[in-house]
Image (spheres, grey):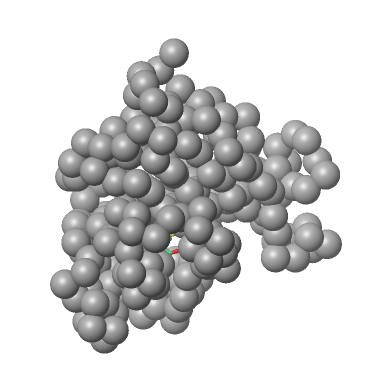
Amino acid sequence: MTAVTDGESLDVRDYYRKRYASSTPAQQEWTIATAAPELVNLVNTGRIPRGSRVLEVGCGVGSESVYLASAGFELSAIDISADAVERAKALAECYGLGDRIEWAVGDVLSLPFDTEGYDVVVDRGCFHCLRAAERPTFAAEIGRVLRPKGLYVVRCLSSQRIGAPAPQPTSMFVKTFGVSSQELWETFSPYFACEQLELGSHAPDDESVPCGWLGLWRRLEQNRPA
Ligand SMILES: C[S@@+](CC[C@H](N)C(=O)[O-])C[C@H]1O[C@@H](n2cnc3c(N)ncnc32)[C@H](O)[C@@H]1O
């Protein structure tokens, strides 16, 4: 298994393409076989309203898209890895949902989807794959495909820890991918109002386990940076 060790020279797109081409989902440390509890909660509480048209960015092998389609949502999903999307399609077929999800292989910086075509965009671990210089383009693309007042749900790695206000990169992994609340704000506030931003951890007492953000960003009526 290839480890993420050199954050400066890492080509993240290439890294994921190679990993998906050469490993099974069980060997991919980021792949889990189900939707995350916070996404299920957003569905069950109606914060992602029934009937929403949803886009998943960086869908990987499709666990969350298939969950959302099985919950009745109309889905589109995109990933940079053709191998990941093939696996995602196969998973959807297993559940009889093959015709409910529109799959695309491509880059989230240039989404092949209609302007204002979605009510919700969900993201588990894609935004933090982008380099800092790419973030404004990403925010503009998410703002473009969402309808006014549409919701962007981001889950990403944090460079901050609970109770520590300043970024504290503890490992090369966090240094490479971790995002601070200020960076999230700078990236998304030109297009979105922040509805919720939570820092969480599966193991708050273990400093070696990175924390993650759950962010809910509501697209502004006027889709233009102030
Ligand atoms: C941490 S993984 C998460 C995958 C999936 N969301 C999950 O939870 O299993 C990040 C995903 O983003 C994809 N990705 C990274 N950069 C991308 C880009 N620029 N365009 C499209 N997909 C990208 C990767 O291929 C990978 O599937």
Closer-to-camera residue (149/224): 149
Residue shown at 61% from the left, 42% from the top: 196
The quadrant in which residue 59 appears is: bottom left
Q: Which residue sits furthest top? A: 226
Of 169 and 123, nearer the camera is 123
Residue 122 located left or right of residue 117: right
Q: Is residue 90 left or right of residue 197?
A: left
Q: Hey, which quadrant is residue 205 in on the image?
A: bottom right
**x 78%, y 35%: residue:** 165
Quadrant in which the N terminus appears: bottom left
Image quarter of the C terminus: top left
Q: Residue 150: x percent and y percent?
A: 39, 40
> Measured from the top left, where is residue 2 in percent x and y?
44, 66
Q: Residue at x 19, y 76 (%)?
A: 98
Q: Considering only vertical position in the picture, is 60 above or below 10?
A: below
Residue 100: horizontal and vertical position, in percent?
A: 21, 69
